[in-house]
Amino acid sequence: MKPPTSYSLAGWQLARRRKKALSATRHAPLRTVLEASLPAPSTPFGDVPFLCLDFETTGLDPARDHILSIGCVPIVGGMVQLGAAHYWIVDFAGTLDEETLAIHGLTHDDLADGIPLAQAIDGLLGQMPGVVMVAHQASIERQFLSAATQELYGAACETLWVCTLTLERQRLKHTGQHLSVRLSQSRERYNLPRYKAHHALMDAFAGGELLLAQAAHIGGDRCKLAALV
């Protein structure tokens, strides 16, 4: 099987992973995401539907750590759609110390009243068909999402991601600067306001604003999806 000439190697590899995942699951919401067409690399930024995502978790290892909350905010027509944002708290039967709870802005009662992970993931999957996912240090969200769908539904959630941390690192590399690429410090370089960190919905919104600023810096109306992935 030869890669289609219209695909980059990465795009062809993603298509193969999506096909493999599709054959491994019968779960309708996940299948809908895997079957949906994704925007072409030549698509102008303003025509790409994005979904900015943030997970708050008990740690950084999806094999042993747990998702505590999920926030997602769409970008449509080059604008953050805060009115269409979603936020879910996931029930958690384990024990967290008060410092960890304070960092995430959660309480034991919040987690006790949370919804099952499957319900939260299905809510997220319902926002994902045909969109390009966005996250700061996207490898974390991508790995936790795929681990969750693998455990729940037998297949990884294979889709296209934009990593705002990677974009910022690339920008600084071109300037020869060695500065922090954490979300708050990256936003400061574009004169974006400071928000409360470690809240899934606020971090998703903050990542979306950062992507808009980065796309404007890259090329404004001339920025194509290929410049971001």
Image (tube, rainbow, N blue to C red):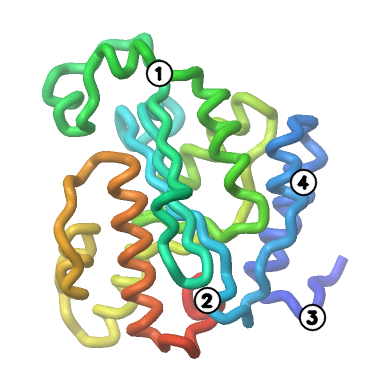
The residue labelled by disc 3 is: 5
Q: Nearer the viewer, residue 119 or 173?
A: 119
Secondary element under disc 2, as helix, strand or loop, is helix
Q: Residue furthest left?
A: 99
Q: Which mark is residue 46?
A: 2
Q: Tell whether 18 sits left or right of 126.
A: right
Q: Nearer the viewer, residue 117 or 212?
A: 212
User: Which label lies toward us, 2 or 4?
Assistant: 2
Residue type (three-letter) at the residue carrying disc 3: Thr
Classify 10 Å Cα crowding around label 4: few (below 14), some (14-19), many (20 and above).
Answer: some
- Counting from the top left corner in percent of width and height, residue 23 is at 82, 40
Q: Residue at x 46, y 19 (%)?
A: 115
Secondary element under disc 4, as helix, strand or loop, is helix
Secondary element under disc 1, as helix, strand or loop, is loop
> Between marks 4 and 1, how big is the CA–CA gap?
32 Å
Q: Tell whether 180 sits left or right of 169.
A: left
* Position of 120 relative to 221 (above/below): above
> Between marks 2 and 3, how big is the CA–CA gap?
25 Å
The residue labelled by disc 4 is: 20
Q: Which mark is residue 114?
A: 1
Residue type (three-letter) at the residue carrying disc 4: Lys
- Counting from the top left corner in percent of width and height, residue 156 is at 63, 40
